[in-house]
Amino acid sequence: MATTTSVDYGYLRDLVLGYSQNVLDPSRDYLFDTRLTKVLRHQGMTRLEELVQSLRRRKDPVLERAVAEAMTINETSFFRDSRPFELLRTGLLPKLIEERRQVRGLRFWSAACSTGQEAYSLGMLMRESFPMLSGWSIRIEATDLCAEVVERAQAGRYHRIEMNRGLPARFVVRYFDHVGEDWVVKEELRKMCAFRQGNLCGPRFPFQRASDRFDVIFLRNVMLYFSQETRRALLANIHRLLAPDGILFLGSTEQPADPSIWNSVLAGGTCHFRPRQPS
Ligand SMILES: C[S@@+](CC[C@H](N)C(=O)[O-])C[C@H]1O[C@@H](n2cnc3c(N)ncnc32)[C@H](O)[C@@H]1O
């Protein structure tokens, strides 16, 4: 006699939470059915129940990671919410550049970079608006939890539809090569950006050393997936890695969980954050 089993979505939600700290709402359990089809196929399985049973039976970190990564939301675009980029161009970077005259270097971090558009946008902004810094060391580090999007970012290959979202036509011509249906980032831009996998909430934070300090950090549209407690811990780590005069951008609807260590500054129709120093 055939038995009917129902999927233990709670188990899957806990697994995702444990790995990426992404809090998934039970009202959206149906997303597991669509997002995990590739993982199922790869495992030679057809039903989610089988996957849950297999995960319960035997600890498999690779499979757990694949499940957590498949449940991430990777929505992004070039120059997304253009105001932070505009504010950097017109006010924040000219001042920072003046302050870094001696060291002749700037470090950016696109934390939760998804498929790379944010990092490449920063690169284009620097090349376009500050060409006089060609002799400086301009480094754009970019990390994301999900291996698949990091690979796409490294490939720097974008479909016409992705290019049409937020990218001025003259930037397309200047920074990309047309290859078939796609556009591929030119070497000049690619070499400014370093992409790698990194979990913002795992046992090993993507950057550790004091020398890893950043001048500008973009941590946008990712905190909304975390609990308040996780946000607090993450922002304490970010605070440690930001230069005392550094700048943090969050997503347009996001706020620091612990306002006592951040000064929020409203300018250019957007909000950015400065690390408050202990008095
Ligand atoms: C909505 S995208 C935001 C991309 C980009 N920052 C932007 O604003 O356009 C969120 C990204 O956060 C990543 N993410 C989720 N949880 C993460 C974690 N614990 N550590 C690192 N990245 C994570 C996802 O893989 C996804 O690519």
Image (cartoon, rainbow, N blue to C red):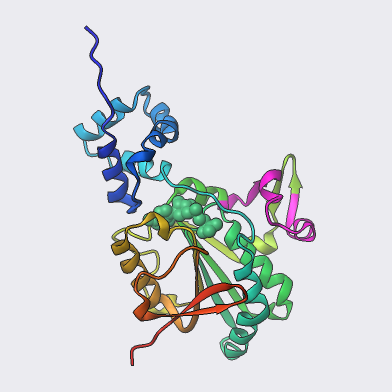
- Residue 167 magenta-highlighted: yes
- Residue 186 magenta-highlighted: no
Percent position of residue 21, x then y: 32, 54
Name which residue lies at 36% across and 44% down: 68
Residue at the extreme top: 1
Between 115 and 277, the residue placed more toward the observer is 277
- Does 24 sit above or below residue 131? above
Between 185 and 256, the residue placed more toward the observer is 256
Percent position of residue 175, x then y: 73, 59
**Quarter of the C terminus within the rendering:** bottom left
- Does 135 sit above or below residue 164? below
Quarter occupied by residue 267: bottom right
The region drawn magenta spans 153-177
Q: How many marks?
A: 0
Side of 126 where 65 appears, left or right: left
Percent position of residue 136, x then y: 63, 80
Name which residue lies at 23% across and 14% down: 3
